[in-house]
Amino acid sequence: RTVLRGLGQLLITAGVVVLLFCVYELKFTSQYTAQQQKKLDKQLVQQWVAPPTGPQGPAVPVSTLGKGFARIYLPTLGPKEVHVVVEGVGHDDLKKGPGHFPGTDLPGQLGNVVISGHRTTYGAPFNRLDELHAGDAIVLETRTTFFTYTVQKIFVVKPSAIGVTYHVPDHPGVTPTQRLLTLTTCNPKYSARTRLIVRAVLSSSLKKGPGVVPPALQAVT
């Protein structure tokens, strides 16, 4: 009886520890990311209003890992689904928000812009990617331009399927002819067993200016 009582107390203690860990993972990591997102957004605005220091195009590469890269909007999921994308997909980068996969293409370019993000912890920016459908819009905002991509398909791959990040997905060495966007996140929720992939193609680009809002965002702003 004493052994059973001790075992029961041990299991209760273990359960409390696990519960506290879950609370930390879901709440406190999200608070950290929210703080980082505010800081990144402020830095991104300052960066965009500052005079350019070099050759500028519609998409300006950010070479420093962990720094703001662009904003991503998922308008069909609601007005709060906007996040600052950082450069890099390392652990410390993705703690701040979704990350641009280094070496993949830039918004508006021929090729494949690849952005990864957490689905549960650290603000879970891509928690609802599975709710997107073919035809939905995804908007990337850079210093000068809003790029609107239209979702083509949503599918699941193994974690080892790095072909989704190629300039031409699954075709290494082939010259791209489309302007693609690929979003990746863990799948299913609370697991990293597979990867959820959202593939979209560029449908329009709009130069930024006072009062300029792309049609995909007009209903949610």
Image (cartoon, helix red, strand yellow):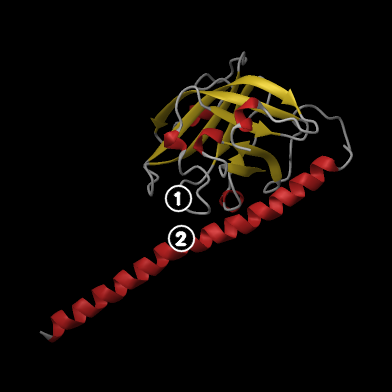
44 left or right of 155 in image: right
Quickly name the residue at label 2: 25
Q: Position of residue 116 (x, y in %)?
A: 54, 39
Q: Is 150 in front, or is 101?
A: 150
Q: Secondary structure at mark 2?
A: helix
Query: Does 206 sit left or right of 93 as displayed?
Result: right
State whether residue 35 appears in this view.
Answer: yes
Residue drawn at 77 percent across, 30 percent down: 208
Which quarter of the rendered picture does the C terminus lie within? top right
Which residue is nearer to you in this view: 26 or 90? Answer: 26
Residue in the image at 59% along x and 36% along y = 220
Q: Work out whether 190 lies above or below 219.
A: below
At 61% from the left and 44% from the top, the residue drawn is: 83
Q: Which mark is residue 41?
A: none
Q: At 53% from the left edge and 52% from the top edge, which residue is drawn?
A: 123
Q: Between marks 1 and 2, how big is the CA–CA gap?
A: 9 Å
Residue 125, percent from left and from top: 53, 45
Mark 2 surroundings within 10 Å by alpha-carbon count, few (fewer than 14), some (14 through 19), many (20 or more)? some
Would you say the residues marked 1 and 2 are in contact, meaning their CB atoms lie under 8 Å apart?
Answer: yes
Horizontal and vertical percent position of residue 168: 56, 20
* Label 1 residue SS: loop
For this rendering, which residue is in front, 164 or 214?
A: 214
Q: Position of residue 48 (x, y in %)?
A: 80, 40
27 or 9, which is in the foreground?
Answer: 27
Q: Amino acid at mark 2?
A: Glu
Q: In the current view of this chain or complex, which residue is farthest to the bottom?
A: 2
| Residue type, mark 1 in image | Thr
Q: Earlier in the sequence, mark 1 or mark 2?
A: 2
Residue 81's place in the image compared with 8, above or below, is above
Callout 1 crowding tier (Cα within 10 Å): few <14, some 14–19, many ≥20:
many
Quarter of the image with the N terminus in it: bottom left
Q: Which residue is mark 1?
A: 120
